[in-house]
Amino acid sequence: AQMGSKPCCCSSASDRAEATCAPDVMKVSDEPLGDRSKEPLTGADMTVVETTWKAVGALGAEKVGALLFKNIFTIAPDALSLYSFKNEPHVRSYDTPGIRSHGAKVVKVVGTAVDSIRDLAAVAPSLRELAVRHVGYGVRPAHYDVVGRALLQTLEAGLGAGFDRP
């Protein structure tokens, strides 16, 4: 999302110095998520992801999705302009039909990826198609860092003591 003329993803020290981000953007980690994403997951990592996502599933897709979007829009308020539900009444309550619906869809897609974590090649084509579609919506690579941070904050809030920071 754009904050002024700089993306509000705070992906580098120079961006952080010039961006206008929410004060808790760096709460989860000072390191951009993309730097760690190139490391392959171990079997133990995959088990942690599967176990964690199972606990998330118990919270309910709409609830988790709405919290995810609340966190996205806290980190990058201007990101709301990218979504079809941006003009819903009371959208900043994060409890609108559009947010609940879209949030549940996002949680379902993440769940599909988690279910296939040991064979990502099986879901890679559909995930690529989804990514291409999102480029058409105006999503840029820097936005994925925002969503990654928001997802970690969502997991932390939803799982409480059951969440271990990366």
Image: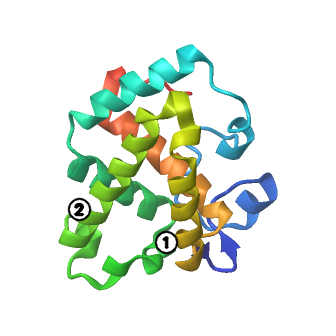
Secondary element under disc 2, as helix, strand or loop, is: helix
**Residue at point 18%, 70% (across, down):** 97
Give the distance between the C-alpha atoms of the residues marked 1 and 2, in whole angstroms. Answer: 17 Å
In this rendering, position of residue 70 left or right of residue 18: left
Q: Nearer the viewer, residue 57 or 155?
A: 57
Task: Choose between 75 and 110: the one closer to the eye.
Answer: 110
Position of residue 143 measured from the top left corner of the image (x, y, whole percent): 59, 62
**In the displayed structure, would residue 44 be above or below residue 21?**
above
Give the tally of numbered discs: 2
Is residue 3 shown to the viewer in this render?
yes
Mark 1 or mark 2, whichever is nearer to me: 2
Seen at 54% across and 32% down, the residue is 119
Q: Position of residue 156 (x, y in %)?
A: 39, 34
Residue at the spot x=62%, y=68% of the render?
Answer: 20
Tag 1: amino acid: Ala
Read off the residue under disc 2: 100
Q: Are marks 1 and 2 in contact (CB under 8 Å)?
A: no
> Pointer 1: what residue?
79
The kind of residue on which mark 2 rests is Arg
